[in-house]
Amino acid sequence: MQLIELMRQLGKVHNYDVEKDPQNGGVLPILEPAEESDIIENIASLEDGSAFASHVNFLNFTKHDQPRPIYINMVRDPVERVISWYYYIRAPWVFVPGRRRNNREMPNPKWVNTEFDQCVLSGEKVCTYIENSLLEHVGDHRRQTLFFCGHNEAKCTPFNGRLPLQIAKMNVEREYSVVGTWEHTNETLAVLEAYVPRYFADASKMYYSGLHSDVQNSNPMKPHIPQNIIDMLKNLNANRLNNTKDADIEVLFFNRAAKVGSESMLELFMALEQYNDDLTLERSGLHTKTYRQMDKKQRRQSAEYVADLEEGTMYIEHINWLDFDEFDLPKPIYINLVRDPVERVISWFFYARSSYKNAIEYRKKPDQKIRPESWYKKNFNECVRSGDPECQYVPHTFKDPVANFKRQSLFYCGHHDDCIPFNSPTAVQMAKEHVERDYAVVGSWEDTNVTLTVLERYIPRFFRGAKLMYEMHNNKITNRNKNKRKPYIEPEVKDMIRKNFTNEYDFYYFCKQRLYKQYLALNLKELEKHGLLN
């Protein structure tokens, strides 16, 4: 819009008019050959000295035996473009008249108010930029190269693809007089003046006489986007985010954290074992004793057991991260799950009192002393409010009055003494390092589709067909070990204990963001080719 306004002012001086496309600023989609021919003929029929502006992909005048015009265009930083568009279509002066004109319902307030960084981190389709994906039909114009590539849908629409990029480059080199950018205003204006003087003589003078302070189509409502979000979008690469290639053996090691939905993952493993002939589920880890901290001898024994498993084995155990390098052993493919820290401890509180867990316990140890009825009926809200030691999650504590598995990060930190203090920044930092370096995927059932997609693509040997198996066995997977008798927990109570989980939440969000980054970097077109998407 800024360039069009400049041309309009210059046209008054140099005696030419600027004709805009007939769509009132709309964007012409991929055109059929007949449609492309029509618009080319219309442009070619304009008188010499005319200027025509349209949101339309590159038009090949030579292919249609028509005289070639003087082509110009502008480019912008790709990430800044999609952010700008995101907020542009949410501006009331854009969506209100646009929807009224087309008799469309006004948008959901949630859609209008969702910030771009939230949209990216939550993995919403409109903010998910998948390499080589075809048109998403979300209207965000993420393909800047499409305007230079043309109207061949198969060749030009794969997002961030090499072929459309090469075609766009070729067209720019062969057809365009100038492709400028407002990121380099002086250089762009100087080149336009020198290379297209009939239309842009004295463009710099005209621009700085007042147009530069009246930015067309600007959006003052667009907030500041954190640099980490911008950097994340610019640097996503599935290969760099996949640690599966760093494993020494094709053994899947699920050192399952407590109360994250590991029983559901076990059910999925069982379905995958039946579905894939080359997979074996080793169940011995389901019956081992859980230790909060192991000595070196115990760690060696556990690591040696995993390292000796046959390739194609899936192994699951409640055990903290093991350093296979410490014992010069081949490293398996690590996976795990995370869950909202407060929801985890609430889940454990009721799980410990559940009929399911106690039936298992007393079946194993019939003579075990039974707890008093009051313990089973304890109210979590009152437990927190009354200061009951069982429900007081005190930062930096080593010992707990009652076992509660509140340290989610402990499963990723390991067995070092520094891993034990609850909500410790040191423990969390160690856990993050291990996740970043050793874990192929850390998923979450809070984001089921994202997790299954990432597992399928990053660890195909073990998770091919995972989404299909999940759908086929959904009832078993989602209901395994589920406590349907968990009572209502007051939001105020959750807020009270959440204050003591600051570093645990830091770790949780770190893992979730890593998962989203892995998902965003995926090539979903490849998954579709193999029939793994529903």
Image (spheres, rainbow, N blue to C red):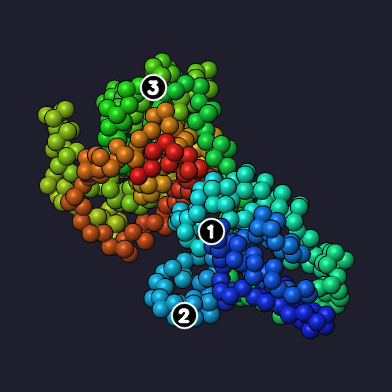
> Tag on residue 238?
none
Q: Residue 352 appears in which quarter of the rendering?
A: top left
State the SS at label 1: loop
Residue drawn at x 42%, y 73% is 107
2 or 1: mark nearer the eye: 1
Q: Which residue is mark 1?
A: 32
State the SS at label 3: loop
Q: Quadrant for the N terminus, please.
A: bottom right
Q: Are marks 1 and 3 in contact (CB under 8 Å)?
A: no
State the SS at label 2: helix
> Which residue is more in the foreground, 223 or 417?
223
> Which residue is more in the foreground, 227 or 410?
227
> Tag on residue 101?
2
Going by the numbered disc 2, the residue's amino acid type is Arg
Q: Distance from label 1 to label 3 (Cα)? A: 50 Å
Q: Which residue is mark 3?
A: 312
On the image, the x and y values in percent for residue 264 come to 28, 39
Q: Distance from label 2 to label 1 (Cα)? A: 26 Å
Going by the numbered disc 1, the residue's amino acid type is Glu
Q: Are marks 2 and 1 in contact (CB under 8 Å)?
A: no
